[in-house]
Amino acid sequence: MKVTGYRSLTTKHDWGRLIGDANGVMSEPRTDVHVLILETDAGLEGVGLGQHGDIGRVFGAVEGEDPRAVSALYDRMLNWVFKTGHAGATFGAVGAIDMALWDLKAKAAGEPLWRTLGALDRFVPGYASGLDIALDDDALMRLYEGFADRGFSAAKLKGGHDVQRDLRRLEGLHEVLRRNSAQPALMFDANESWNRAQAVRFVTALERGVDLTWVEEPVRRWDAAGLAAVRRGIRAAVATGENLTGLEQYRPLLDADAVDIVQVGNVWGITHFLRVAALAHGHDLPVSAVAYHANPTAHAAAAVPNHLAFEVQDVSSPIGLTVDQQYEDGGIVLGDEPGLGILVDEASIVDLQVTSPPVVVDGPHVRPSRAGLRLTPEAGREADRVGR
């Protein structure tokens, strides 16, 4: 079996709500989902998810090769761009191809990927995370009531602008989740929007009212000294890693003893997750996957010994994708479909007639001009508005 080509599709996920974080909010409740389909001469096709606009830079490393040699092909893709770098869009393309290769490997074996990777249990513990900063308090509680109905006893709130609002909302989540646990786990995500002094002050204020399990990305992802300083200044654990692209970016954080929960982004692929998990395990640290559509690395999470909890952002699937997994008992129950269990209805995706989006100028993926340069969070938000 050899890789012969690929097809790229763009579908949509309908969240039924606006999503965002401390950096901004998406302009509409539908967001793009990028689908990669790897073709082979055996008729099998592999599915990968995530932006892969740089695929032309790395596809030659796998073209004509047996997809079952996935670990070697992963390294080959990185080697092809070792002079020009593999971060950002290139690493996204590597990740999408890697997912599709693992999908093909498991399909060739006629089994789900979690089985191919050596997992014993198909259940992946999770936590609810609604990308919820745009919701008012009532809508927030309704959203997490739905998660609680599925057995979730842990949740992560987006915030970082208003400590009193965030505290009130964390207390509300605690009450919603108490039906499933006497001591629900509460996490808080600032999405790199603070400097280190702000982070300690803000989190310390929150901790006077609630017991936080972890605080996520309180400062910039690469700021090892800053993350270590925050870690020393608060009770909660510090979580980071979803935006790191390669093992080498984790090393400074681990050397500085700056992280308690090692996170991995789904969009970077299966092999990246497995390697980061092994690196974290070598430091006696847990690993946690940050969600993406169809939760592809859940299969890998089921197979590693130090997985803590998998982020679940929504219980529906993108348009045109059917995913063989269920959300029960506060986690993900993986199915028996071969590979990743993702079935693609290309006709329904083509009917969407997705057009090229305009250049993004704001929202959660664009850093505000005054992020980290604020005397108070509210003043920073006003300065952002005035400057536009």
Image: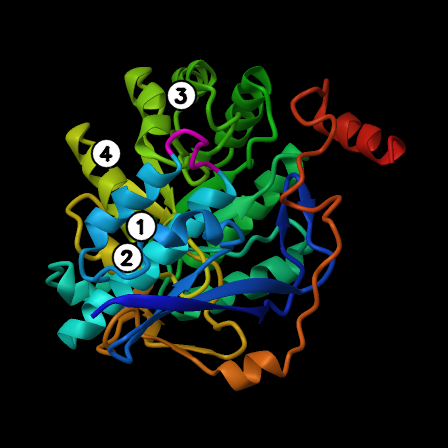
Question: Where's residue 224, x and y in %?
Answer: 42, 18
Q: Are marks 1 and 3 in contact (CB under 8 Å)?
A: no
Q: Which mark is residue 309?
A: 1
The reply to whether callout 4 and callout 2 are in contact (CB within 8 Å) is no
Q: Which residue is mark 4?
A: 280
- Which three-letter amino acid code belongs to the residue tagged 4? Ala
Can I make out residue 293 in this image?
Answer: yes
Quarter of the image for residue 199 reads top right
Q: Which numbered disc, 4 or 2, marks the residue closer to the eye?
A: 4
On the image, which quarter does residue 66 sit in?
bottom left
Write the start and end of the magenta stretch as one range. 82-87
Residue sitting at x 35%, y 48%: 289
Q: Are marks 1 and 2 in contact (CB under 8 Å)?
A: yes
Asked if residue 343 lies in the magenta stretch, the reply is no
Q: Earlier in the sequence, mark 4 or mark 2?
A: 2
In the picture, the disc for residue 231 is: 3
Q: CA distance from mark 4 to mark 2?
A: 18 Å
The residues bearing labels 3 and 2 have C-alpha atoms spaced at a distance of 25 Å
Residue type beneath disc 1: Ala
- From the image, tell me which residue sits under label 2: 125
Which residue is at 37% across, 27% downward? Answer: 249
